[in-house]
Structure formats: C-alpha cells, structure tokens
Image (cartoon, rainbow, N blue to C red):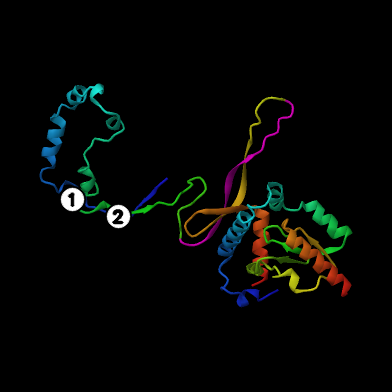
Amino acid sequence: MIGLHSATQPPVQDAATEIVGLLQRCKLQMSSLNNIRKKARYSNMYCTPRHIMTFLQKWAIATKQKFASPLAFDPSYQAYWSENTRDTVFQASANAFDTKFTGFSFCHPNYCDYLLHSLVGHALQSTIST
Amino acid sequence: MMKVIWQPTWEAAELLLANPEFKTYVNSYENADTVTQLNAQSEDQETNLTKQGYDGCTQHFENMWDSSQGQNIRDKAIFITDTVNPQADIQHTWKCEIWVRDVDLLKPGSNKDSEGEPIIPEHITCQAACAFDIYGKCTGMLSLERLNILLHAYNQSK
C-alpha cells in the first residue's frame, strides 16, 4: 500500500486537508440519503459495534471489510474497501466489485436495495467461480 | 450573525487632535442642556418607528463611515457575512486544521426512576479532534482514537 499518494489525482494534500475532505464527503453522502425512510436513514449512521467486529474476526475468520469507510473501519482487519476512490489516501481499496471476493469478508453497506442485491450477487458469483 | 474583523492600524496621538475646532465642539457639547431636551419630547409624540431607533433622517448614513482623519473606515474593515458559530468555529488561517480541544456535548438523559418528569440531557465535556476548513468553519469532530487511526493510515499509504 506504500506509494499510493503519488498516483492519486488530484494530488494528495496534507493530512488535515484530507481529513476535512473526508468529513465533507461523509456529510454529502448522508444528505443524499434524505429521500429514504427515516428508520433506514438512521441505521446508515450507525457504526457496527466493536465487539461484533471482534467476534466475526475471531469466530468467522473475517479478515476484510467491504463497503467500509475510513471513519468506521476496524484497523485490526487486514484490508478494507470503500465506495469513494479518494479514500485510497487512507489505505482503502477502491471498488469492491472490481475483484472477486476471496476468504471471509464483513460488510455493513448502506441500506440500498440495488446495492444489497448487487453485493449478494457478486458474493455468489465469487463463490461459484472459486 | 455578522463577523467584523478590523485590520491593524496605527495613528499618531497628535493626529487625534488634528481638528482645530475640536475643543469648541467639546465645549458646546458640555454646555448643551441635553437633559431638558430629552424631557421635552414626551413619549406621546414618539411614533412606533422612533421608539425603535428610526429618526426618519438618512443623511447620517452618507458620512457614518468617515473618520476624523477623513479616511474611509470601511476600507479598513473586512465584513464576513457567512454564518459563524463562535463556540465551534475558529479564526480562519486559509488552510485546513485539526485541533484537539475540549468540547461540550449533550448526552440524552435517562431518568427511569422518576416517571412523568422531563428528561434533561446530561452535559459532558470531552476531548475531541475538531476539523476546520480553510474558512475556520468546523466541519466535524473525531475521537482521538479515530484521528490516530486515520493519521497512521495516511502515513502508511504515503
């Protein structure tokens, strides 16, 4: 993962600027969810509790996080994937659908029917082709 | 809310008395019987607008920005008309900043024992990393633990 900053466009700024940009992206994403039901909208704001993440890591051998965010990923996992390509500045991998799912992954995506359908489909295709 | 920032200026002390008729104006002000004048205007004669501070004359708006030195005070001031939250925002530095500081938070209260009474939120103070954009506006807060994780990830992917 070393050297990611040199290839990122627009050029990577200092850490403070990138963190401010990350928070603004998060706000923008939350505001775009206003048209969904209130209960689903609130559930998108919740992070997965730490003890559940630890449990899945220990007993389900989950080593990767799909559709995570730099603001919520667990650093004890080997790798995480984010929806936003700019999050590669914080060691995220860009698009979870670009590669085949391998091993056991943990995923807590936004509650979007289309996304959940695509995610399950991709997981099944990955399993079949393994 | 409007935020006004004064640019630094310096004026020599002797220039403050540059107006030769300064003492005349001071004397006329001190000799004027202002108390009598104020009492003469009964409250019945004042309109609602007058009570709110509007005197009907707009002439003073034309020279309200002129200083005693003849310079325009407006040129020395920067007016920022964006909304400002003095409790959260900082003076802009034209670059993004992360400040670790004490923040006041309200935690939803839970008084299950006393039914019927209003639930008052609990006030707590904790340390958090506040992120400010180039205009000094607070974009959001992070826990110190998450800030360290982000900084570590940022440095690792350099």
Q: Can residue A62 be seen in this view?
A: yes
Q: Where is residue B82 in the image (x, y as percent from the top left)?
A: 43, 52
Q: Quadrant of residue A78?
A: bottom right
Region rendered in magenta: B94-113
Q: In the displayed structure, does residue A11 sit left or right of residue A121?
A: left
For this rendering, which residue is in front, A18 or A27? A27
CB contact under 8 Å: marks 2 and 1: no
Q: What residue type is labelled 1?
A: Leu
User: Which quarter of the rendered picture does the C terminus of chain B lie within?
Assistant: bottom right
Question: What chain does badge 2 belong to?
Answer: B
For this rendering, which residue is in front, A130 or A81? A130
Q: Can residue A64 be seen in this view?
A: no
Nearer to us of marks 2 and 1 is 2
The disc label shown at residue B15, or none: 1
- Mark 2 secondary-structure assignment: helix
Q: Where is residue A112 in the image (x, y as percent from the top left)?
A: 72, 58
Reading the image, the residue beneath label 2 is B76
- Mark 1 secondary-structure assignment: helix
Q: Where is residue A40 in the image (x, y as percent from the top left)?
A: 71, 50
